[in-house]
Image (cartoon, rainbow, N blue to C red):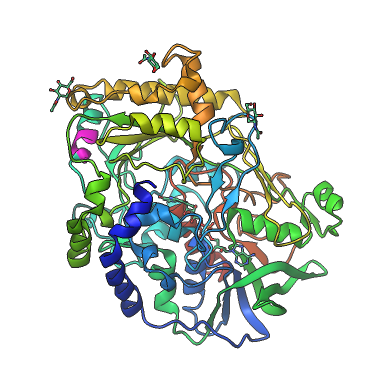
Amino acid sequence: MGLLSHIMLGVSVAVLVAYFMSLKKNGGSNIVSEIRKKYDYIIVGGGSAGAVLASRLSEKDDVTVLLLEAGGEETENSLYHIPAVCFILQKTEADWGYYTEPQKFSHFGLNGNRSYWPQGKVLGGSSILNAMIYNRGSRYDYDNWASQGCTGWGYDDVLSYFLKSEDILIPTLTDSKFHNTGGYLGVSHARVTPFVDYYLKAAEELGFKIVDYNGEDFEGFAETQFTIRNGVRSSTARAFLRPAMNRPNLHVITHSRVVKVIIDRKVANGVEVIHGGRRYQIYTSKEVILSAGVIGSPQILMLSGIGPKSHLDQLGIPVIADLPVGDNLQDHLMLPVLTRVNITGSVTEKAMLSWWTSAQYYLFGTGYLSSPLVEVVAHVSTEENKEVKSAPDIQFVFLSGLPKSNDLYDVREDIMNEIHSKLPEEGFYAFVALMHPKSKGTIRLRSRDPFDPPIIDPNYLSEEEDIKTFIKGVRLLEKYIQTKTMQKIGVSFDLLNITLCGAHVFLSDAYVECYVRHMATTEYHPASTCKMGPPEDPSTVVDPQLRVKGIKGLRVVDASVMPVLTSGNTNAPTIMIAERAVDVILERN
Ligand SMILES: Cc1cc2nc3c(=O)[nH]c(=O)nc-3n(C[C@H](O)[C@H](O)[C@H](O)COP(=O)(O)OP(=O)(O)OC[C@H]3O[C@@H](n4cnc5c(N)ncnc54)[C@H](O)[C@@H]3O)c2cc1C
Ligand SMILES: *[C@@H]1O[C@H](CO)[C@@H](O)[C@H](O)[C@H]1NC(C)=O
Ligand SMILES: *[C@@H]1O[C@H](CO)[C@@H](O)[C@H](O)[C@H]1NC(C)=O
Ligand SMILES: *[C@@H]1O[C@H](CO)[C@@H](O)[C@H](O)[C@H]1NC(C)=O
């Protein structure tokens, strides 16, 4: 039993409060029991993208919108709204609970060489499970999309859609032209330890800028911005969907698993959905929009006959469109670097469980429970003397505590025991994450059964270059912990010394490679399985209007359309994609 399970006990008081906050402030729900035969728009999946789409499309009162979600309502569990408990939501009913296939080049320190992939299964989707880091990515990410033929998705095109969602609650940023107030999505800091000052001071010592990474400069170190409003998670369900829930033109049906798009002569006419053990056909007069996420959307497409021909042939699914659905899977891999410190003030188990922590959250919505604890993020480039301006390739994430848990990553017991036996009270995690992986993977169907979990193979670290970049990232972190500021608080790398890699000289390139191949795991940012781009490009699935190529009335709007993964966390970019999609769908450009 680690910190994470103990948090469960510690939040008892806070739970009651969050419960009332979530139910009272947000009005009722109009989860309908009567399904109409036909809607203008059918949205499949009420996650980060789907909840935004449903809210925005139903603003037009002359259209009817149906949102179908496989999971339940986000109001059913008050823990969904408390920032610090985000990680104990994994492996619950709000999570699809996927595992990757055993990996050939990574995950040697994880059970079965597989990693656990949580994905939200509830209104709000993965925005209910995520760590709430608000990160739009680099302007070069979007300019790169545009240069690959994603017309309309350059940075200057998408900025206004980021702004549209936002309600910046950080006083120093309210006047910035890169931020906006009054949007649905609350964005705030959640600093709860004095470690923030050390992280930033050490960065300055090394010559890094302290930036607003969602503003002018992406590169540098920063206090993290979170999708949190008054100590409560701004999930897309709570922020976007609830305010729209009473509209008569919006129907939301939970516990509804879409198994297929109904396609007749290359026109999407509706969907087939399992609800309460029965199968229904629901039709559309305009379009079906898949927002089922990076696994769900390709899965539904392939079950409907849209996907790689050879794969569909193998399963005996009649091919309607031969497209590279499920290819191009990308994810950020991150390496947990545990460090010890010789000062106090990190978030310890004891601090998290104290009555004061609960009381503070209960009374003021502040304190440890109000923060995901990843207090500082940094984006740095390992390329020296870069000629062309481009997005940084490494992200550091600093978590101000050393929670003891192996249930999260499925780390092998022998390794976990060794690490736990050395774990000090006080310290922090510095995660090193690879932003532009060269290695790509696939999503495929396991069978024709829609309830069979798809085959997820990220193929992490299959490209040698990814290891090289990781090593450079770790070298940068080594320099960082050698700064005066870090040395003064007694930071060291000694927790990285595990017997498993003992055959190599500690911290040599070979040692770091060994450590990475054993211990690096997902940063939970899979994307890009329904690639957007010019229709003539054989690697694309949707065009820049997000229409599935060759099929009328069918779009994909979620993280799976990103042609290339952004250089940061993926929730804000996904929300932006949905915001812009609405204008594209309604032809409001
Ligand atoms: C643990 C974790 C931590 C993360 N941390 C961060 C972070 O700190 N910052 C950040 O920016 N990003 C983070 N992310 C990533 C981010 O949350 C996702 O990229 C984003 O939510 C993806 O949005 P989406 O709309 O594509 O999919 P989702 O939000 O996953 O939504 C898909 C929805 O479709 C539903 N669905 C799927 N299949 C079907 C079906 N057949 N029928 C009906 N409904 C279906 C699902 O139940 C779900 O509700 C994190 C993710 C996880 C899992
Ligand atoms: C995991 O990887 C190791 C190292 O390559 C290998 O020896 C082992 O057989 C793999 N286990 C599984 C379950 O794939
Ligand atoms: C922490 O360690 C550093 C380096 O060894 C030392 O200079 C410093 O005095 C220590 N601080 C405390 C509070 O022990
Ligand atoms: C790493 O740990 C091993 C075993 O505990 C120990 O013998 C070795 O000296 C350590 N190496 C370093 C560089 O700390």
Please report the residue visible at 47 percent of the width from the left and 50 percent of the height from the top.
Answer: 570
Left or right of 512? Residue 538 is: right
Where 212 falls versus 122 (above or below)?
Answer: above
Where 263 falls versus 414 (above or below)?
Answer: below
Task: Please tell me in which quadrant of the rendered image residue 107 appears.
Answer: top right
Magenta highlight range: 195-200
Was residue 346 drawn as part of the magenta stretch in this picture?
no
Was residue 196 drawn as part of the magenta stretch in this picture?
yes
Please report the residue visible at 36 percent of the width from the left and 56 percent of the height from the top.
Answer: 85
Front one among 70 and 260: 70
Spot occupied by residue 98 in the image (x, y as percentages of width and height): 59, 51
Left or right of 546? Residue 310 is: right
Front one among 402 and 335: 402
Spot occupied by residue 452 in the image (x, y as percentages of width and height): 71, 57
Front one among 412 and 313: 412
Left or right of 492? Residue 104 is: right
Front one among 312 and 63: 312
Task: Please tell me in which quadrant of the rendered image residue 183 appears.
Answer: bottom left
Where 108 falls versus 233 (above or below)?
Answer: above
The answer, for residue 56, to whether it is visible in the render is: yes
Spot occupied by residue 312 in the image (x, y as percentages of width and height): 82, 53
